[in-house]
Structures are given as C-alpha cells and as structure tokens.
Image (tube, rainbow, N blue to C red):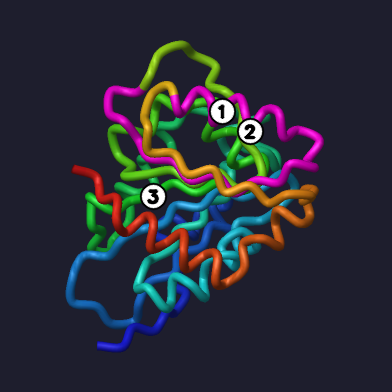
Amino acid sequence: MRLTLVMVAATFAATPAYADTTLDVPAKHEDKLPLLVVLHGDRERADAAARRWRAAARERGWAVLSLQCPRDQGCKDSWWQWNGDPAWLVAQIDALKIPVDASRIVLVGWSGGATYIGMHAQAWSDRFAAIVIHGGGQAPLADGCPDRALPAYFLVGDKNPLHGLATDLRDWWQGCTKDVTWDLVRGADHEHEDRALDRKKALAILDWLAARPRR
C-alpha cells in the first residue's frame, strides 16, 4: 500500500509551550509506525528540523515527531542550554495517539539538539532503538554506559569548530557499544554538515535504523 504523509497536530499542540511541535504521520497505515523523534538546533524551530527528514520519511513510512524545546519548562531556544529532564521527551511519546512500533523509536538531534542527546547519553536506552547525531554532540555529563548498548549514527564535518566534542562523544559511544557509524564529511563546516543530510543520505540513515530495532 502506498503511504502518503500528512501533517497532523500533536496531542499537546494547543498548549502554548508546545505550539511549534509538529507530528507527521502516514494518512493510511495498517501496522504500528516506526517513529523519528527529532530535536532542533539552537535558535531553530521544530518544523525546520522536521523538514530535513520529511521526504525520506514519506518514502519509508516513518512518522516524524519534531519537538520544540519546552518554553513552559524554562527552555528559550536551545536544548543543551535548557538541559532539562530527558523524561520530558519520553512523556511526549507516551502522549501520542498514533500506533507506534515500540521497537523502532529513534532519537535524532541536529546541532544543539545533538549536543543535548550526548549530554544525557545514558538516558535513552530504555525507550529508543538507536540515536542519530547530526552536526553536534558532546560526551555525557555522567559516568558509565547505558543499561543497553544503543547503536549510534554520526553525520559530522571535520571543519565544525566544535568537531572535537563530537569526536569525544563518538569515543565514549564506542567504549559502550561497537555499533557506531562515523559518517565524516571531510572539509564540512556547520553549514555543510546541514547540507549533507539530503534526501539520499536521509534514506540511507533510515535504512540503517530500520535494520536495528530495539530488542
């Protein structure tokens, strides 16, 4: 059956703090949906972050939940500066009224969103199947590995001035699990890291993720 994506309001969209959050789901579906949970970059809105993935998600039949960093929780425009409780993200997934495949929920971060994911790297293994770090990242604030080895895909450029922080996160992740893909865009600064996620790359990453369900 051919899947087409339409944008629908998230269950919490009427709340001012979440007004910019977006949820894209297939108009028709028979089975539970794989879900991308996307975190935006600094001074960016959730809809802009979702646009990086929508075309590929349409082709592969994934739902995309792009979360706006919650203003009512004290966030202004930056996930890493907010540094709030990761349980808030999980609560937004639990609030969804769509059939989600619990074995294929993936957390994706761009720039500052990726850095926030890295800061709390141990927190994600209970709910997510894998992680995507795009143009950001830093080593976690706490010591120790997560309870379950969590696959991670890095799409980064070596001319980003903060590239060393992403490398630190990769090294930490490799110490906790061997399933790490380091997709380095040589000569890419932050702008070109963003451009590296075109439709072809997004499809390849979704295929990588589909092969790694949470068991």
Specify whether residue 113 is painted magenta: no
Quarter of the picture holding the C terminus:
top left
Position of 160 with respect to 173 (left or right) is: right
Q: In the rendered image, which quarter contains the N terminus?
A: bottom left
Q: Secondary structure at mark 1?
A: helix
Check the image and name the residue furthest to the front.
186
Q: What range of the chain is rendered magenta?
A: 146-174
Locate residue 6, reporting x and y percent: 44, 79
Q: Earlier in the sequence, mark 1 or mark 3?
A: 3
Disc 2 secondary structure class = helix
Cβ atoms under marks 2 and 3 closer than 8 Å: no
Name which residue lies at 38% across and 66% down: 63
Answer whether residue 172 is magenta in the image: yes
Q: Which residue is mark 2?
A: 166
What residue lies at 61% left-to-right and 58% top-to-bottom? 49
Q: Which residue is located at x 60 percent, y 42 percent?
A: 113
Q: Residues within 10 Å of mark 3 (few under 14, many from 20)?
A: many
Residue shown at the point (31%, 30%) measured from the top left: 149
* Residue placed under numbered mark 1 in the picture: 169
Q: Nearer the viewer, residue 52 or 87?
A: 52
Q: Evaluate if marks 2 and 1 touch, with contact meaning CB atoms under 8 Å apart.
A: yes
| Residue type, mark 3 in image | Val
